[in-house]
Image (tube, helix red, strand yellow):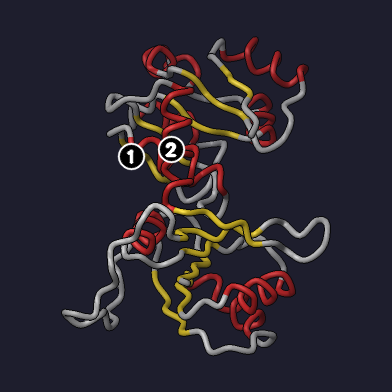
Amino acid sequence: KVAFLMDNGLITAQLFLGAMYGGYVVVPLNVRAGVAQLSYTLDHCDAKVIFVEDQYIGLLHDAMEGVRSNIRTITLNVDGPLPAFETAAEGQTTEPPTGDDVALLMYSSGSTGKPKAAIHTHSSILAHGRNSIEAHQLSSADRSLLVLPLYHINAECVTLIPTLLSGGSVVVAHRFDVSRFWDWIDDLHVTWSALVPTIISELVDWDDPGKEHRQAAFQRIRFLRSSSAPLSPLLHRQFLDKFELPLLQAMG
């Protein structure tokens, strides 16, 4: 098991994909979780190594006080470069993973008790990707904007995996920023993005200073997507009235 406690970034995406590609099981950790929940998750998941961003070292230190096993810690910057650390010697690499092998442990929020680890195999992750490709008709011409955190299944299996699997490209923002969202869409030629209702509410309330010059960007956008929580009809209508962009509500 390979855990990470990081915001989004190039290295975060590479760790998420690379650990699975190498035959390991990736365990994304919620940076917004409290010490008790992180401690339980780390103790439960049997991780052997955790990659942590500098700003979360203190949080990890506090969480590790309740962890019984010894977990190796590697600090890094989400934008790289990767730090120097030992890798498997030649001849010691793992066998290529099969479809039935476990690839990902996603922990629930713990709202009804202790967090529970949802087990995803390589086949199920690819199925996630293909479902989104089919539903949204993704192709190599698409470029998605990833603003949801990579410790969330939405970011991983709705945006990152499907876009790459369809041959498209992904813009990886550290986190959502309402003051930069439309600039990212505009400057980086984004064709779609997966959002949640709280983000949509912020966009509706935000007075974009560049709104008079977004025509080309808005014509390029194929759709935006809302999921992970119910989108109220009122908020949906407010967004459509303000931006006149396709906004799909999805659920799974």
Q: Position of residue 43 (x, y in %)?
A: 64, 79
Quarter in which the C terminus is drawn: top right
Q: Nearer the viewer, residue 123 or 109?
A: 123
- Under mark 2, the amino acid is Gly
Q: Residue at x 47, y 30 (%)?
A: 132
Choose mark 1 or mark 2, whichever is in front.
Answer: 2
Q: Nearer the viewer, residue 208 or 46?
A: 46
Q: Mark 1 or mark 2, which has the lower sequence index?
A: 2
Q: Quadrant of residue 17?
A: bottom left
Secondary element at image label 2: helix
Give the residue furthest to the right.
112
**Residue to which mark 1 is pinned:** 164
In this rendering, the answer to whether 132 lies above or below 110 is above
Q: Quadrant of residue 240?
A: top right
Q: Residue at x 63, y 23 (%)?
A: 249
Give the residue furthest to the left.
90
Q: Position of residue 42 (x, y in %)?
A: 61, 75
Secondary element at image label 1: helix
In this rendering, the answer to whether 27 lies above or below 179 is below
Badge 2: residue crowd in 10 Å (few <14, some 14–19, many ≥20): many
Residue 182 marker: none
In the visual, does 74 lie left or right of 139? right
In the visual, does 121 lie left or right of 67? left
Residue 129 marker: 2
- Under mark 1, the amino acid is Leu
Whether label 1 touches label 2, CB < 8 Å: yes
Q: Position of residue 234 (x, y in %)?
A: 77, 17
Real-space Cα distance between discs 1 and 2? 9 Å
Task: Tell how many labels.
Answer: 2
Q: Nearer the viewer, residue 54 or 248?
A: 248
